[in-house]
Every structure is written in structure tokens, then in C-alpha cells.
Amino acid sequence: MLRYAASRLGMTLITLLLVAVTVFILIRIIPGDAAQLMLGESANQQQLEILRQRWGLDQPWPLQFLYWIGGVLTGDLGVSTRTGQAVLPLILDRFAVSSIIVLVAVALAALIAIPAGIVAAWKQNSATDLTVVSLATLLLSIPSFWLGLLLLVVFGLKLKWVPVLGYVGFSDDFFRAVSFVILPIVTLALIEAGVLIRMARASAIEVLRLEYVTHARAKGLSERQVLLRHVFPNAFAPTLTLIGLMLGNLLGGIAVLETVFTLPGLGRLLVESIYARDYPVVQGCLLLTAAVFVIVNLIVDLLYPIFDPRVSAV
Amino acid sequence: MSMTEKPLLDIKALRIRVGAVDILKGVDLTLRPGRLAALVGESGSGKTMLARAILKLLPPGVRISGGDITLAGEAIVPASDRKMRTLRGPVAGMVFQEPMVSLNPAMTIGAQLAEALRRHTDLSRDEIRTRAIEMLRRVRIADPESCLTSYPHQFSGGMRQRIMLASVMLLRPKLLIADEPTTALDTLSQREVLDIMVQLARDAGTAVLLITHNLGLVARYTSEMTVLRNGVLIESGPTADLIAGAKDPYTRELVAAARRAESLAEPCDAEAGRLISADNVAVRYRGRSDTAVSGVSLAISRGETVALVGGSGSGKTSLGRALIGLAPLERGSVSFLGERLSAETNQIGRTMRLACQMVFQDPYSSLDPHRRIGTIIAEPLRHAQDLSNDQKRQRVEEVMRDVGLTGLDRRYPHELSGGQRQRVAIARAIVRHPAFVVADEPVSALDMTIQAQVLALIASLQKRYGFACLFISHDLSAVRQIAHRIIVMDSGKVVEEGPTRRILDAPEHAYTRSLIEAAPGIDVPARPVASRQLERTVP
């Protein structure tokens, strides 16, 4: 188990190196000049040169890459060319905002979706099932920004239960912070619940057909015990994989929702930095995203045998 | 026990319906306490639905539409779910067919055994544990303590079926319903599981309803039998009487299919010359420390049928696959018509690729569900450059006629029965007129009467096309019919080899004798298993 985790972590490092190279090259292939964007149309050649020199952009790419990767290895991701802030604390700060929303939303989605999916499967083809499936399909097909705006209009503008604009850190004022993140969390949870319901229902239908479920009933167990002890663990295993992929994806930032709710998250930071050709920040964001993705999926793989002992993590 | 005592199970005019179709059309069945009865029928006869109706565990959409079931004095048809839950377990338990899916893979054996006891008794944790260990010992699980903390996937099919039996018999039910409990097992495990089942039932005074399509098992273990066909009761009575002389022609047909002792194989031409030979072949799969096949040499002549016999895990399938390059050789080599497949390269040559074919055990997963039958059968002809498209079409039509599937080329696999699908698999194997066919348990997933038809088909095709065949099987009666020669394997090695009659009638090796002994012959009278088995269990 430990050896498996260690070798997977080793592979993670190689993945991250490849990500670093790719990100580094891609952002430089996009046309545009950070210095020009910063100084505007009126800047003369000399001013541009000075700025480029200061950011090291006058060096050849391989050299730039070595400087950057050397910094990364010592925990220094460079300085934002746009704001002059150090990249590492900046992205960690933004990541904290995004990750709270994503983790709570996905947990909430799983808590709603898995029981709903299992019950729908149990009552397959009944009115309950039809309702759950229709609802899931509806949630799946709504664009997240539209649902977000709708909730903002209803709860923010009409009912005035939550503020519409802005953000406060959790360490500053916990309850006000909650009032800012509650709508994005609900929006994301609803959208993701749609996928999870369908997945949990499909897995549970598979499991309900198997003989061990009939065997459990033939022992005289109640339906509740059958669902909890025999259907849930077996239907949850495939759903867990999906949750892993989902978390990995979303933790990279939920740029659209962050924009709708004006939250200082990682996704919005990334988009803004790409516009400004803020190379160090873009590189830092993507590297962090990739690392999180790989680590989340490693954790899922390590957890998997708990729900499906046939897959032992050797 | 008097003959007038009340029956434990009394089913009267039971009808079961799916949608608007009756799948059980008024069936009667009675079973007295402590008796062993068989419910016999082929796929689609409704025997499983009848069994499930006794516990009201019918799948969604299937319902009881008429008749009565009385189980231990309780009327089942009107009983509430709550009432049923008190009957399931202590009054009647059920053992299922598929050992691979009948235990929950995510739960330890201990937890699964404890579940029913916790639900139906007031025993303490320790008492439950003691009883579970005692019961596992009785079903001959070697290390019961460590078994409790293990998961089902750590056990073989036969062991799982015994654990399943333990889980049901822990409650000492009055009735045990065993739905094809050993169909998925090889002959040796089959024998062991059923012997244990009968022993446990006898000790606990449990009546057994054994549902099966295997008349050999019925003859060996039961005293009464009921024959079902397409949801209709054909005949019922004492097992010995029905086997000796059934009134109904269908029962007689079943008995004849189970008896099938005469050989169908044409005498093989001894001068035909060698087709394929294996020299000291060993197979080991990646990541496994043990070898599946360790050093086997054999030779098969043109047109000869050689049966490869052994229990699960004996290496017979691996050897069969290795011969045609489907499993990697670790050591040794295979020669086929001048071509050589060796462990060094593991590359199979073109002749071998084109002239060797395979028929698999499970006709449900060996055909691509997205393709039509005609396309599936035609596929091996893709590489036949010497044939024009017209000739290819003609060839496909010809083999479809040979296997009795004329006119079904536009169908999809799911539209065919198991027997028909296996005919498709056979047609696909012979369409190129191969020199060598490996048939891996080609009939063991089929009903008895269908088995007889498919075996006759293989024999007649062989006569017509003259291919040699490696027939891998654990079913000795099939082997007796079709093989010229038998090779017996155990633990990856050949233990005995010789002409079919010699091996079956005068086996020399102890393992061969145990295989033959375990084979369920229909003419073996039901005999008490108790005394013999006790000798083995008492330390």
C-alpha cells in the first residue's frame, strides 16, 4: 500500500514536469506581449525593453524555463508581472476560496445524489424514479452561470437574504463570508448532483440485479438493511471514481461561477492572468491545478479498496 | 414420521405472470419435512421463478397471478412483507447459482454470516462467532477464523458455494431451496458441495428442493422429482421410478440426453499424420508466481478429437489457449504443420493463425452483441484472399445450413437462445475450414438436451470437414461421446493419457478415478452420503 502510494507519487512528479514544460511553452505561443499590454500603445521601444529585461523575458526560452523551474523547486514561483505580488501566496490564497466552495458543494451534491440515486434505482420505473431522473436531467442541462444568476436574482435582489456583490475572507468575518459563498455552493452542488444521481442510480440498478442482494433478502433482512449494507457500498465504488474526477476538475477553478458571484477564486485569477499575459501567475495556477488533480485521484484510488476489496492497492 | 404428516411445502395450481404472459401455468408441488426433492427443467421452464415465489422474492414485474403456496402452515400468497421477512431465513433459506455474485464482495464473510443470526436470534456477538466458525468447519473451510475476516473474492467458486451454504444453514431452516447450486462448478467441487449440502440438511432435519437441469444429480441425491417444461407440470413422482421408466416422452428425452453413453466419434485414421504437437510447454501469467501449465507435451493427429479433462485450475484452458498462441509460452514450443511457436518469440505464424480456431464456453459473451449473426460468422473469411465475395457469401450460407441456422443471418446474438448462439460460435470457428479447433467447455453452459444436440453437431461437422479438435471439458459424459483420446490434467501437469474407453473404464491414476467417481451418472442410485462423508470429516 505504502509502496504503491510512493510509486504513484513518483509518477506524479513526472506528470507535473511534463505539465510545467507544456504550460511554459503554450503560454508563450499565444500572441501578445506582457510589457506592451502593461504599458499600453503609447509606450516606446526603450521602456518596453526595460520592462522585458526586468521580467527576464529578453532571455532565450530554455534559460527562462530553467530560472522558473529552479525557483519552483525552492518554493518560489516568481512575481506577478501585473501586480508585483509573489505568485505562490497569491494562488494559494485564491485556491483557498475556490476549494472551500468546491469541496462543500461536491460533498453536498454527494449527500443528496447518492441516496436519491439509490432510492430511484430501488423504485425503478416508478413515479419516484421518474421524478428523480427528470430532476437530474434538468439539473444536468442547466448552464451553471444561468442557475447562478437566477439564484442571485431571487435570493439576492428580490428577497435580499444574501449580498449580491463582493467577498469577505473567512478569517475576517465568518458569518458574512458564509453569506457570500452560500449561493455559489448551492449552484455548484445542484449542477453536480445531476451527474452524480445518474451515476449512483445506474450503479445501484446493476447491483440490485445481483444474486447477493436477493440472498440478503432471503435472509429476512429489511429493505433498509439491504440497501444500506449491500447496495450502497457496492454502488458507491464507481460513483467514487466520478467524484474524484469531478473534484480534480473543479478544484482547478470554477471561473464562470466565480465571475458570476464576483469571488476572488483561482479560476478567475487564471482567466485574468491569461488576458494580461501574466506568465508567472498562469504557470503557477496551471501547475497547482495539475498537482491537485493528480493528488485527488491518487487519494480516490487509495480509498477505492475500502468499498471494493477486490481491487487491492498493491 | 408417518406418511400422513402435513407437507412442509404445498403448492397448488400456482400461476406466475410477466406482463400478460403466464410463465408458470398452474403447477402443483408438495414436499414433506426432511425430504430431498428435485425440480427439473431446462432454461425457460419456470423452475427458478417457482423457487423464488416460495419466498416471494420474484424480480420486479413478475407476479403470482393465481394458486396457493403453503409453507410450514403459513399461506404465502397473501402474506405481508413483514410476515415474509420472519419466514425468510429461519423457515426457508435459499442458495443461488452463481458463486461469483451470490456473496457481497464489499463485506467480510464474518459479517455476512452474522447478519442472519443477528436478525433472527438473540445470540451475543461471541455466540454468533462461535456458531459461524463451527458452521464453516462443517462445510470444510480450512481456517474458519481467518475466513471470517476475509472477503469473498479470496475464495474459489466451490468454496464460496460452501460458505453460502454455511450462511443459509446457520439458521437451521425447515426448507432449503437450492437453485442450480453447482452448475457453475467443476465436477469435483460440484460433488463436494452437494455432499456437504445433503449432510447438513440431514443433520438439521431440513427438507431440500434442488432445482437443476442435471438429471445425474437428481438421480444421485433426491428421492422425488418434478419435471417442468415451459411453465407446465410434465410429471412428478419418485425419482427412481421416473428415471427407470417415465410416462411422459419429454421426461424420457431428458433421461436419454443424460444417459448418452454411446460414442458419436468416427474411428480416427491412425495413418493421418501428426497435425500439432507441443513440446514441454509451460504457461505462466504476468504477475503470478505459480505456473498455470508446467511442462506438458502432447501430439494430436489430423481429424482426431482429444479431450483435455481436469478440474478448475488444472491448467486445461491455459494449455488449450497456449497451443494456438492465445496464452504466452514461458517454456517449450508448439509445432503446427511445419510452423513453430516458441517461448523465445511467442509469435504465431500465418498458417497457424489461419488454420486454428476456437469455440468458447460462454455463448453470451463470446459473440459481439452489436453485429448480426451473418457478419459474425463471415468475419474469419476476411483474410481469405483466395475467395471472391460471392464465394464467401456462399460459404457462410453453407455453414449456417450445416449448423441449422439457415435464415437467421440478419439476427443479433441477443435474439437467439443459448444453444443457437453456441451454434453461431461453432459456425464461426469452422467457416474457414480450419485444421484444428480448440473447444473450451463448449457445452457446459447449455441445457442437457441442447448439449446432446450440440455434441452431435460437432461430431457430424468433424466427419464432414475433418478438422482435429481439442475438446476441453470437465464433463466426462460429453467426453465419452466425442473424444478418441483423453488427456487428464491436474495442477498444470498431465497425470494420465490414453484412449477414451481405457481411461474411463480402467483409470490408472487416483485423480482420474476421483473425477470419474464424482461425475454424476444417471444410473447411479441415490445412496446415503452420510456414512462415507463422516469418515472424512472426523479428524
Image (cartoon, rainbow, N blue to C red):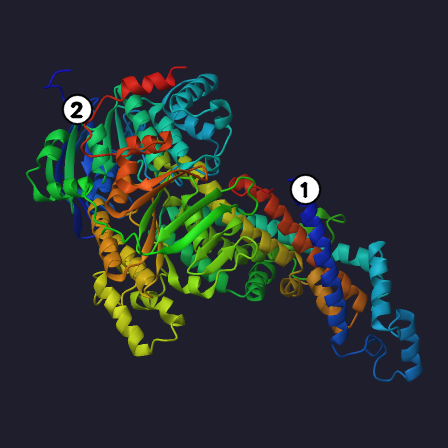
Q: Which of marks 1 and 2 is in front?
A: 1
Residue topped by disc 1: A3
Residue B109, image x, y percentages: 46, 30
* Quadrant (top left/top right/bottom left/bottom right) for the N terminus of chain A: top right
Quarter of the image containing the C terminus of chain A?
top right
The front one of A45 and B472 is: B472
Q: Is residue A80 visible?
A: no
Which residue is labeled 2 in the image?
B32
Q: Which mark is residue B513?
A: none
Are labels 1 and 2 on one chain? no
Kind of residue at badge 2: Arg
Q: How far apart are marks 1 and 2 (CA)?
A: 59 Å
Q: In this view, does A257 lie to the left or right of B154?
A: right
Q: Nearer the viewer, residue B329 or A86?
A: B329
The reply, left or right, for residue A274 in relation to residue A206 is right
**A157 lies left or right of A66:** left
What secondary structure is marked by label 1?
helix
| Residue B272 visible from this viewpoint | yes
Residue at image location 31% in from the left, 73% down from the top: B392
Helix, strand or loop under label 2? loop
